[in-house]
Structures are given as C-alpha cells and as structure tokens.
Image (tube, helix red, strand yellow):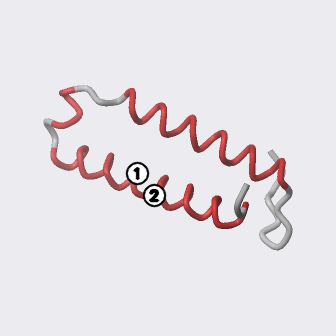
Amino acid sequence: MKELDPQTPTEQQLYNLSFHLDCAFAHLSEMHFPTLYKDPQTRQAYRSLQDSLADIHHDLAAIAGPR
C-alpha cells in the first residue's frame, strides 16, 4: 500500500485502512484463549492494543466523515 498523504487521503485509501483495521479486530477477537489472560502483562498488552486500534478506527471515521 502506498504512503497515505495526511493532507489528502483518498476514499480508496481510507477504505483500505478501514478494511485492514477490521481484520485486525477480527484477529484480536480470535485471541480470546484462557491462556492469554493468565499472564497479567500479556492481558494488559492485549487491552492496550485493543485501545490503540479503537483510536485508529475513530480517527479514520473522523477523516472519512459521514457516509
């Protein structure tokens, strides 16, 4: 994927980013194994990653505007 120009994101670039973000959320939801939550450090890293992805999703929605 080409570098995204922060000044002029195209609709296709935003769609691609949104699609990849949705894939990342899907992969995260597949990680709900009991062993993941046994280690507090791993559990915290997982939650931090979820929060970061949610922030990215929110930022993309703001750039894309209403549909």
Picture coordinates of residue 57, whole percent (x, y) = 56, 55
The front one of 46 and 9 is 9
The amino acid beneath tag 1 is Leu
- Give me the disc on residue 38: none
Residue at 25 percent across and 52 percent down: it is 44
Which residue position holds label 2?
A: 52
Q: Residues within 10 Å of mark 1 (few under 14, many from 20)?
A: some
The image quadrant where one finds the C terminus is: bottom right
Do the CB atoms of the residues marked 1 and 2 lie less than 8 Å apart?
yes
Picture coordinates of residue 23, whole percent (x, y) = 57, 35
Which residue position holds label 1?
A: 49
Local secondary structure at mark 2 = helix
The image quadrant where one finds the N terminus is: top right
Picture coordinates of residue 21, whole percent (x, y) = 59, 44
Residue 32 as seen in the image, left or right of residue 8: left
Q: Residues within 10 Å of mark 2 (few under 14, many from 20)?
A: few
